[in-house]
Amino acid sequence: MSKLISCCGLDCAACEAYLATKSGDREAKLRIAAEWSKLYNSPINADQINCEGCLSEGTRFAWCFKCPILACVLEKGYQSCAECGNLPCESIRWLYDSVPEVKENLIALRSSSSQGS
């Protein structure tokens, strides 16, 4: 499976919400909603588990509309944090700690874009 990297470095193609949205898997959405409700100590229902990627024109998970990382990327006119000379900043450091692969993905994106220039 190829990677579909979001603005923060998460791999959407490996995200369970993205996969459940793309496949229309209602049972997976119910399971994810229950897990995320416990994990984030916030009520989430299966109908909220809809995401086609934070930079897509399609459906996005509710958190995307509150995400400080996405807001920063859009404000700067970037496609991802990999384009920012201030990486890692305080907006993304918490994500580095909780999902270490985002750092690796952003470094790979930065490297591939510098090789293409």
Image (tube, grey):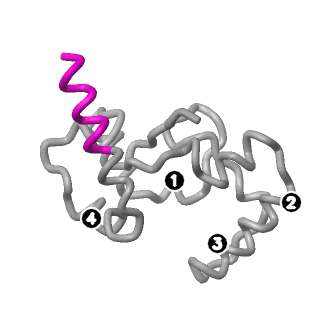
Residue underneath mark 1: 65
Q: Earlier in the sequence, mark 4 or mark 2?
A: 2
Of the 4 image quadrants, the one containing the N terminus is top right
In space, the residues marked 1 and 3 are separated at their CA atoms by 17 Å
Along the line of sight, the residue nearer the viewer: 54 or 12: 12
- Report the amino acid beneath label 3: Trp
Instruction: Please tell me which residue is depicted at 65% across the width and 82% down the height of the picture.
Output: 38
Residues rendered magenta in the picture? 106-117
- Report the amino acid beneath label 4: Arg
Q: Earlier in the sequence, mark 1 or mark 2?
A: 2
Element under disc 4: helix
- Report the amino acid beneath label 1: Phe
Residue underneath mark 2: 27
Element under disc 1: helix
Mark 3 Cα-neighbour bin, 10 Å: few <14, some 14–19, many ≥20 = some
In space, the residues marked 4 and 2 are separated at their CA atoms by 33 Å
* Rendered view: 73 above or below 68: above
x and y percentages locating residue 113 in the rendered image: 25, 26
Hey, which quadrant is residue 73 in on the image? top left
- Report the amino acid beneath label 2: Glu
